[in-house]
Amino acid sequence: MLNRFPHLTGWGWESEADRTAVHAALDMLGLAEFASRDVLSLSGGERQRVALAATLCQDAPLLLLDEPLAHLDVHHQIDCLEALSG
């Protein structure tokens, strides 16, 4: 949710649109089941996917990524590339 900061208005409380964007990014990368877990309890690859989901939920027009597929299994690499190409 932290990556939605540029979209917050007023008092800085997230809206339903923010929550929807976050859950959509988590779903896109198969991370919905990790939504309530502490990031410190995740593996390196899971953390990498969470970081990518956080980036995707920003709805930025341009992404500059440095090794976005590091620490990922092949099937997760494919999922991430498909998410990035969309």
Image: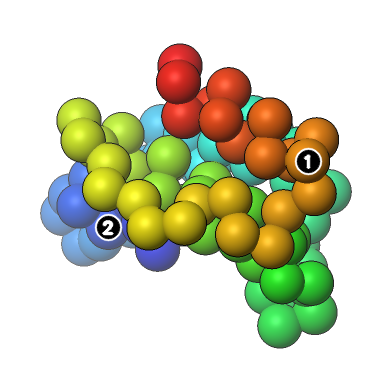
Q: Measuring 21% from the left and 62% from the top, which residue is drawn there?
A: 11
Q: Measuring 71% from the left and 83% from the top, which residue is drawn there?
A: 40
Q: Measuring 72% from the left and 54% from the top, which residue is drawn there?
A: 72
Three-letter code, disc 1: Val
Q: Position of residue 60 (x, y in %)?
A: 24, 37
Three-letter code, disc 2: Phe
Q: Nearer the viewer, residue 26 or 82?
A: 82
Is 86 placed left or right of 45 in the picture?
Answer: left
Q: Position of residue 56 (x, y in %)?
A: 43, 40
Is 6 placed left or right of 84 in the picture?
Answer: left
Residue 40 visible, this orientation = yes
Q: Nearer the viewer, residue 71 or 84?
A: 71
Mark 1: secondary structure? helix
What residue occupies the far bottom of the structure in this picture? 40
**Number of marks drawn:** 2
- Looking at the rendering, which quadrant does residue 50 occupy? bottom right
Q: Please say which color scheme the image uses.
A: rainbow
Residue 43 higher or lower than 11, as above or below: below
Mark 2: secondary structure? helix
Q: Position of residue 34 (x, y in %)?
A: 78, 56
Is 1 placed left or right of 59 in the picture?
Answer: right
The quarter in which the C terminus is drawn is: top left
Q: Gap between marks 1 and 2, in whole Å?
A: 31 Å
Residue beneath disc 1: 74
How many other residues sit within 10 Å of disc 2, few (<14), some (14-19) or many (≥20)? few
Nearest to viewer (mark 1 / mark 2): 1
Q: Position of residue 35 (x, y in %)?
A: 72, 55
Report the disc number at residue 10: none
Q: Measuring 80% from the left and 79% from the top, which residue is drawn there?
A: 41
Residue beneath disc 2: 5
Q: Earlier in the sequence, mark 1 or mark 2?
A: 2
What residue occupies the far top of the structure in this picture? 86
